[in-house]
Structure formats: structure tokens, C-alpha cells
């Protein structure tokens, strides 16, 4: 098993762990951080593939994902703040009436 | 012995960094307080930055530390300190989707690893690491449209954040 396969395996593990965290944890902020972990896993796989092909497309995508992550946090944090000001809790189960 | 270790130092460091990043990601699932989870995520991100540095893409390693650790995670830690409320999600960490979520995550990882094992076995073993100059030239000549769309996305994010704050303020008043 060479190092590229190890890195791809790590990227998959990070993505799967992040998705599991989003489903399993109750705290809203922890769920947000698990989403960041998923983005990090995707970034690692993109860098690994870019290293193999030697093209710049993978690195460009990594930069776009950086920007998307920053924008996502900039939107998600005010939403969490508004929710917490209404119900005074970070528990995701307290917002069950939002599920339509 | 030491000579072979020094010759394979970067591979050994790569494995150590990968293992540490994985440990940090697992800790994120089991730790209780959001601040501890944030510290675990920061360690994972720093180790990933070390992996990028070892792969030869130093500018991505620098941006990983600059953008993720210093911008995004400092913002996150600040909000955790701001919302330091003791609530039920601290004492009961997991939702009632625990078993289903764990099974789904394991299934996803199994499917991805199966695809890696049987699908991508013709991975090239030569690694070409490109520097900042060809990346910058490609970024601003080939991918300029994506770059501009990124700025549109950022403006939309700023407007949306302002709108969220304004909605909550109006609700407070009325």
C-alpha cells in the first residue's frame, strides 16, 4: 500500500467520520464542526489526485472549497446565534418543529 | 538503521501525521464539550497542513493554517465562548440516531474503501508537485471565471449574514 492510497483512505475516513458526527451529535456547533471535517476530507482527496495528475485543477478546487467553507461559517454562525437567542439551547432536538 | 530511517523520514512523518489526524477526527465524535471538539478539529487541520507540506504543496499548507485554523476556527472558538450556556446537549452527547448514524458512516466508509481497493488500483506512483508560479498562472488565466464567481459568492454570503441579523433585530422590536 503506497502513500497515495493511505492518503485517499484517510480522506474517506475523515469524510465518513464527519458525516457520522453530523448525524450522531446533538450540539449545533459540534455539527457545524463535523461539516468542516467533511470539507477537509474532500480537500485532502483533491490534493492527492492533483499530485498524481500534476494539473492545477485540483489545487484551484481546493481554494474554492476554502472560500466556500469561510462563507458557510459566516452564514451558519449568525443562524445559530439567532436560534439560540430564541430558544436558549444548542440542542438540535429542541428545533424539531423546523422539519416541515 | 538510522540512515534508512532518515531516508524514509518523510514517509514515516506522513504516516504519523495521517494517524494523528485520524485520532483527532475520532476524538471529535466522542468528546463532550464543544471547546474540546474545536481543539480536536484544530489539531486535525494542523496535521493535514503538515501532510500538504510533506506532499510539496506548501502554499496549500500555508492557506490551510491561515484560512482554516486562524480564520474559521478562531471564529468558531469565539462563538463557543460567546454561547457558553449549560444545556442538555453537554450532558447527553448523542442523538437518538446514534446506532443508525454509526452504521451509515461505517457503510459509507466501507463503500468508499471498496471503490478505492478495486476501482483505483491503477494509481500513478509518480508524484508531480507543482509550485506556486504555475498554479497562480493557471488560476488567473484558465480559471478566472471561477475566481470571479467566488467573489460573487462572498458578496452573497455577506448580504445573507446581514439579512439574518436584520430579521432577528426586527423580531426583537416587534
Image (spheres, coloured by chain):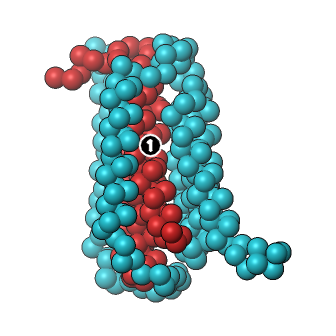
Chain in cyan?
B
Q: Residue at x 48, y 85 (%)?
A: B126
Q: Residue furthest left?
A: A100
| The C terminus of chain A: image quadrant | top left
Q: Classify residue A24 as left or right of residue B39.
A: left
In the rendered view, tell whether residue B14 sits above or below residue B105: below
In the rendered view, tell whether residue A47 sits above or below residue A43: below
Q: Position of residue B112 (x, y in %)?
A: 34, 55
Q: Residue at x 36, y 19 (%)?
A: B96
Count up the numbered dots: 1
Q: Position of residue B76 (x, y in %)?
A: 53, 38
Give the chain of mark 1: A
Does the image show residue B173? yes
In the rendered view, tell whether residue B165 sits above or below residue B5: above
Q: Position of residue B174 (x, y in %)?
A: 28, 14
Q: Residue at x 57, y 73 (%)?
A: B55
Q: Position of residue A9 (x, y in %)?
A: 45, 59
Viewer-proximal residue among A47 and B23:
B23
Chain in red?
A
Q: Secondary structure at mark 1?
A: helix
The quadrant holding residue B160 is top left
Q: Classify residue A43 as left or right of residue B156.
A: right
- Number of residues whose C-alpha sits closer than 10 Å to that of mark 1, classed few (under 14), some (14–19) or many (20 or more): many
In the rendered view, tell whether residue A75 sits above or below residue B169: below
Q: Which residue is mark 1?
A: A17
Does the image show residue A64? no
Viewer-proximal residue among B173 and A5:
A5
Q: Residue at x 33, y 46 (%)?
A: B108
Amino acid at each position: 500500500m503506497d502513500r497515495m492510497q493511505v492518503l485517499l483512505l484517510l480522506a474517506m475516513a475523515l469524510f465518513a467520520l464527519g458525516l457520522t458526527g453530523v448525524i450522531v451529535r446533538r450540539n449545533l456547533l459540534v455539527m457545524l464542526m463535523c461539516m468542516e471535517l467533511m470539507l477537509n476530507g474532500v480537500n485532502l482527496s483533491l490534493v492527492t489526485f492533483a499530485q498524481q495528475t500534476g494539473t492545477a485543477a485540483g489545487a484551484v478546487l481546493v481554494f474554492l472549497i476554502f472560500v466556500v467553507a469561510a462563507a458557510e461559517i459566516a452564514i451558519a454562525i449568525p443562524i445559530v446565534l439567532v436560534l439560540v437567542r430564541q430558544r436558549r439551547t444548542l440542542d438540535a432536538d429542541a428545533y424539531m418543529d423546523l422539519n416541515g | 538503521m538510522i540512515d534508512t530511517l532518515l531516508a524514509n523520514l518523510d514517509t514515516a512523518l506522513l504516516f504519523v501525521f495521517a494517524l494523528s489526524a485520524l485520532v483527532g477526527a475520532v476524538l471529535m465524535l466522542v468528546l463532550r464539550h464543544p471547546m474540546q471538539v474545536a481543539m480536536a478539529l484544530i489539531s486535525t487541520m494542523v496535521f493535514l497542513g503538515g501532510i500538504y507540506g510533506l506532499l510539496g504543496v506548501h502554499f496549500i499548507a500555508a492557506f490551510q493554517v491561515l484560512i482554516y485554523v486562524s480564520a474559521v476556527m478562531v471564529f468558531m472558538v469565539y462563538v463557543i465562548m460567546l454561547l457558553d450556556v449549560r444545556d442538555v446537549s453537554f450532558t447527553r452527547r448523542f442523538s437518538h440516531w446514534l446506532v443508525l448514524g454509526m452504521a451509515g458512516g461505517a457503510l459509507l466508509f466501507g463503500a468508499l474503501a471498496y471503490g478505492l481497493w478495486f476501482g483505483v488500483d491503477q494509481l500513478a506512483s509518480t508524484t508531480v508537485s507543482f509550485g506556486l508560479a504555475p498554479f497562480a498562472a493557471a488560476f488567473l488565466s484558465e480559471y478566472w471565471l471561477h475566481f470571479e464567481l467566488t467573489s460573487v459568492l462572498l458578496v452573497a454570503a455577506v448580504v445573507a449574514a446581514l439579512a439574518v441579523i436584520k430579521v432577528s433585530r426586527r423580531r426583537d422590536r416587534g
